[in-house]
Amino acid sequence: MSSKDNTTETLKRLEARVAELEREKDKVEKKPSRKKGVQTEYTKFCKRRRQEMKDAGELEGLTFGDVSKNIAKEWKENNNKA
């Protein structure tokens, strides 16, 4: 068997597996284990703090990741004091 035949056979097996996984994915029922819209205290803090920073103009030049890091740092500092 040539390498081209091996490649073709492997490709066919992979395509069949992908199709099988897609069918299984369609069968899986989504579990409503968590209510949508439920927010943790951390999520509420992040949302509020990000809006405060936006209103104060503190977001200029910061990436989304930088903002998240700063907010996470504030959260940790505030919760360690309590």
Image: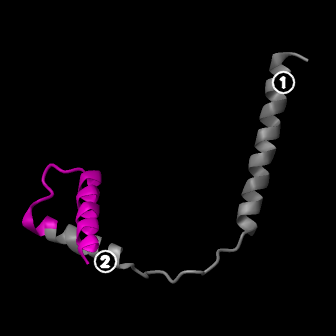
Residue 33, quarter of the rendered image? bottom right
Comes first in the chain, label 1 or label 2: 1
Q: Is residue 72 left or right of residue 23?
A: left
**To which residue does mark 2 refer?**
44
Image location (x, y in percent) of residue 24: 76, 61
Q: Secondary structure at mark 1?
A: helix
| Disc 2 packing (10 Å; few <14; some 14–19; many ≥20) | few
Q: Is residue 76 magenta?
A: yes
Say which quadrant the N terminus sits in. top right
Q: Secondary structure at mark 2?
A: helix
Taking the spot 48% from the left edge, 81% from the top edge, the residue there is 36
Q: Is residue 53 left or right of residue 46?
A: left
Q: How many marks?
A: 2
Q: Is 48 in front, or is 15?
A: 48
Label disc, if present, on residue 73 of the rendered structure: none
Taking the spot 77% from the left edge, 40% from the top edge, the residue there is 14
Q: Which residues are magenta?
A: 53-82
Label disc, if present, on residue 6 of the rendered structure: 1
Q: Is residue 26 left or right of residue 10?
A: left
The CA distance from mark 1 to mark 2 is: 55 Å
Q: Does 39 sit above or below residue 73?
A: below
